[in-house]
Image: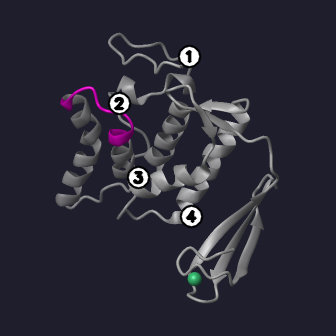
Amino acid sequence: MRCLRCKKDNDRVVDSRASADGTVIRRRRECLECFLRYTTYERIEETPLRVIKKSGERVRFDRERILAGMVKACEKLPISIEELEAATARIETRCQEEYDREVESSVIGSLVMEELRQLNQVAYVRFASVYREFKDVSQFLETLQPMLDSREAAANGVDAPRALPALPPRLPPASLANPALDARRPTEPGAEPREERDA
Ligand SMILES: [Zn+2]
């Protein structure tokens, strides 16, 4: 494996372990030139999953792109790359298990938001604010509120939770919820319409 940092192809495997279900082998590698450590995943090649974009265009499911988006959302936050890699793997598994070869990009976006919400509220808001444009300022502020509350708590000497276990009842706004993830949820009046699936 070519090193991400120095680009030399000289590494050793420091750890190998199979996922619980035995479908993926995770290998921790170390570059022998610059000692950067990175992770590779080995899995059986399956029918490639495709993503349906808003335009209707189909593209290959890109694990790296999902990871890169989450890494960006977590910039300067105390979240390890391993946590994000694991989240990416969970998203891919869910897409493969719940969708037959093709998955809408909005579903992936919602899965990413779901993972980030578990990991870190700030990362979640960052991603959500970029991923879906908020309808108006008040909605954006409402989404920010839990984060501001925890900061205020921190300022008052109360330990802020690292990540909120769940959003308060008034959240999430309809535009952050993905109807595809919960078909039973009725569409609220005034809710953002479902993203249209192009024919
Ligand atoms: Zn290197």
Disc 4, SS: helix
Per the rendered image, the range of residues in magenta is: 128-137
Q: What crowding class fits label 2: few (fewer than 14 Cα within 10 Å), some (14-19), or many (20 or more)?
A: some
Rendering coords of residue 39 (x, y %)? 64, 69
Residue at point 75%, 72% (across, down):
16
- Earlier along the polypeptide chain: callout 4 or callout 2? 4
Look at label 4 and name its amino acid: Glu
In terms of image quarters, where does ligand 1 lie? bottom right
Q: Is residue 133 magenta?
A: yes
Task: Write down the residue under mark 4.
Answer: 82
Q: Amino acid at mark 3?
A: Asn
| Front position among marks 4 and 2 | 4
Query: How far across and how far down the image is residue 100, in percent?
Result: 73, 29
15 displayed left or right of 80: right
Residue 182 in percent (x, y) is at 55, 23
Say whether residue 113 is magenta. Answer: no
Do labels 4 and 2 touch, CB within 8 Å? Answer: no
Q: Are marks 2 and 3 in contact (CB under 8 Å)?
A: no
Q: What's the CA distance linking mark 4 and mark 1? A: 33 Å
What residue sits right under mark 3 in the picture?
120
- Numbered label attached to residue 184: 1
